[in-house]
Amino acid sequence: MPPTDWTSWQAGYEAGIDDAIRLIDTLRGPGAGSLSAPILLRIRAELLAIRSRASQPRAA
């Protein structure tokens, strides 16, 4: 993949992860049930881990 395509793809990927994290934060709002809260926290933790791995330098 050419560098410009990779940069564009990476930006879109990171934006998608950020959107998903915001969605999970919204779902965790005051109306969230006690059963869903741990699941949503786990999903958020996984998304944060994916985001941190995505920001690491790419192997050539």
Image: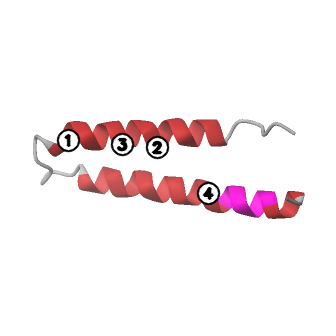
Q: Earlier in the sequence, mark 1 or mark 3?
A: 1
23 is higher (above) or lower (below) than 55: below
Q: Position of residue 34 (x, y in %)?
A: 10, 41
43 is higher (above) or lower (below) than 5: above
Q: Position of residue 17 (x, y in %)?
A: 51, 53
Label ID, residue 3: none
**Callout 3, which amino acid?**
Ile
Residue at disc 2, secondary structure: helix
**Callout 4, which amino acid?**
Tyr
Q: What span is colored magenta in the figure? A: 6-11
Other-residue count near label 3 (Cα within 10 Å), few / some / many at <14 / 14–19 / ≥20? some
Res. 46 image quadrant: top left
Label ID, residue 43: 3
Q: Earlier in the sequence, mark 3 or mark 4?
A: 4
Residue plotted at (38% across, 42% down): 44
Residue plotted at (53% across, 59% down): 16
Residue at disc 3, secondary structure: helix
Residue assigned mark 2: 47
